Amino acid sequence: MLSREEKAKIIEEIVNIFNSYKTVGFVDFYKLPTREYREMKKKLNSVNIKFFKKSLVIKALERLNKKELINFLPNACGIIFTSKNPFEVYKEIKKLITYRFAKENDVAEEDIIIKPMVTNIPAGMAIAEFQKLKIEVGVEAGKIAIKKEKVLVKKGEKISKEVASILQKLNIKPIPIRIKITCLFDGKIIYPREVLELDEKFYINQILKIFSHANSICEKIGWITRYNVSNLVKKAYLNAIELSIKIEFFNEKNIREILRRSLVQVNIFKSLTNIENMEYVYAALLLHEAKKEITEENIKKILEAVGIAPDEAKIKSLVESLKNINIDEVLKSATLQPVQVVQTQAPQETKKEEEKKKEEEKKREEEAVAGLGALFGF
């Protein structure tokens, strides 16, 4: 039994822990083997854990006016305290895991599988134990050999006494041991284990998706921000090019696109007619654009006008090929498309380039998070 003075001293110690450290939380020591716990604790960096009696922790929390934390207190209570932030601490704790032998009625967290192997168990009465569990075995060099892979226990099932015995004989430890945190507190916010378990990458990706969606909405309604202004300027430029082409306002900015479209149209004509000579295709396309009938006589006149001796057979073939074709529908495929610049890349990147990429990716993630606020003026 602790004296009143000893209890008061412990309560004071707990109060000082809460007042002195950035992050404080609770650890559940229930069924946590001492030897394995000590091994895991040695691997912790700048994280302290200390066991306290639950009733004394409650009195300390009442003195601190933090009664809301009482609900997270386990019966076998330990206090974790550190200068690190809650998620950093939890990530470090989560990595610490060791295993123990199974006991009867333990629940398998994953499928427990025995793979083919030659064991160190001498052949004899033990063979019957394996056969009882329908494990296919034989004898090699006087030892029991498992011949075929076997799922002994499926995930979520209880482990029987017989299975626990076999696993121990095979030196298989299937039951994970972890330091169980019930909550962490940073002086303002309580983070329950369920919150701390959240997948960091998943939520970063969700934020990026939300940012992208919000950015898209802003672009559609014309709300200009530093995150969409570049795209809006590009769209405005492309719209201006498209408009100038439609009203036939030719200039050095749109002439390349006009020529590109013309070439696309000519290539489409070539695919329809199988005529390789470009001048015949140009003549047919010119007649179509001028809303003139594509006839042998009209094509012949155009070719003669520019000094080309017409080939009657080719002209006839061209006109026949286009007779039942809806040229306007076919030419719809020749739409305005932005020019894409293809950059070549070395087969293997240097480490510096890889590091630079990672830094840029991290920066984009941070900007995306900040950008959500910036988009809506927060």
Image (cartoon, rainbow, N blue to C red):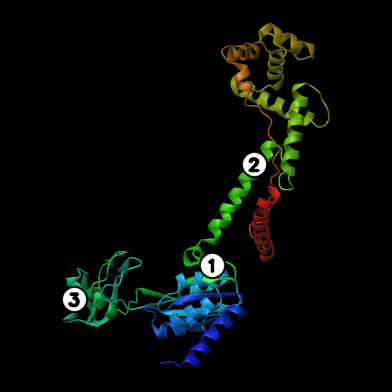
Return the residue at label 1: 190
Choose mark 2 or mark 3, whichever is in front: 2
Tell me if residue 373 can be seen. Answer: yes
Any mark on residue 358, and which?
A: none
Q: Which of the two labelled residues, at mark 3 and mark 1, occupies the earlier sequence position? A: 3
Any mark on residue 129, and which?
A: 3
Q: Secondary structure at mark 1?
A: strand
Foreground residue among 342 and 222: 222
Dividing the picture into quarters, in which one does residue 190 lie?
bottom right
Q: Residue at x 22, y 75 (%)?
A: 161
Return the residue at label 2: 216
The amino acid sitting under disc 1 is Ile
The amino acid sitting under disc 2 is Ser
Foreground residue among 174 and 60: 60
The amino acid sitting under disc 3 is Glu
Which corner quadrant holds the N terminus? bottom left
Kindly indicate whether the residue at mark 1 contacts the one at mark 3 (C-beta within 8 angstroms): no
